[in-house]
Image (tube, rainbow, N blue to C red):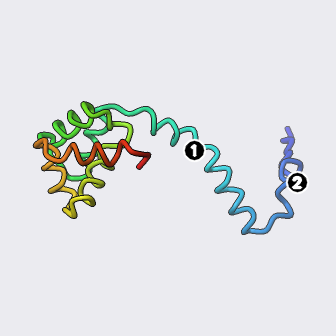
Amino acid sequence: MKRQDDYENRRQHLKDLTDEQLYERFWSLTEQIVKPLVDLSYTHTSPAIERSVLLRMGFSSLEAKPIVDYGTKWNLLGKGIGNVVLTYGKLKNKDYLEAGKELASGIGWDLIVENMKGGDK
């Protein structure tokens, strides 16, 4: 049985593209495919996901839980709790681990809420 190959027909719109044009087309199509996933990640998170991010940043579970709890209380989960910690560290000119420990103990939330609620950071 002979295979009916339509490769030559399917590649007609690509055959005259340079390597650079093919490269750009590939990444453009990739961005289109991934965009819905990225958009979804901005609006759909959970305390478990945010704790997981903090654990991967080097916080202990005993530190991550209160940070996420405060972030939930202040409605900041959608900003990304890792981002919250990094932003607070920059605002206070501290290492992010030290900044996170302050946030875990309840210190600094007024500053971070004021800074992050003002716009998309």
Position of residue 68 measured from the top left corner of the image (x, y, whole percent): 23, 37
Density class for disc 2 (Cα within 10 Å; few <14, some 14-19, many ≥20) is few
Identify the secondary structure beneath mark 2.
Answer: loop
**Looking at the picture, how far across and down is residue 2, in whole percent?**
86, 41
Q: In this picture, is 57 found above or below 1?
A: below
Between 109 and 26, the residue placed more toward the observer is 109
- Position of residue 15 relative to residue 3, above or below, is below
Residue 33 location, quadrant: top right
Residue bearing the label numbered 2: 12
Whether residue 77 sits left or right of residue 44 in the image: it is left
Q: How many marks?
A: 2
Position in image of residue 29 (x %, y %):
67, 50
Q: Amino acid at mark 1?
A: Val
Nearest to viewer (mark 2 / mark 1):
1
What type is the residue that disc 2 sits on?
Gln
Q: Residue at x 50, y 35 (%)?
A: 40
Give the Cα separation between the discs numbered 2 and 1: 26 Å
Q: Return the mark for residue 34.
A: 1
The quadrant of the image that shows the N terminus is top right
- 50 displayed left or right of 66: right
Q: Residues within 10 Å of mark 1 (few under 14, many from 20)?
A: few
Q: Nearer the viewer, residue 69 or 7?
A: 69
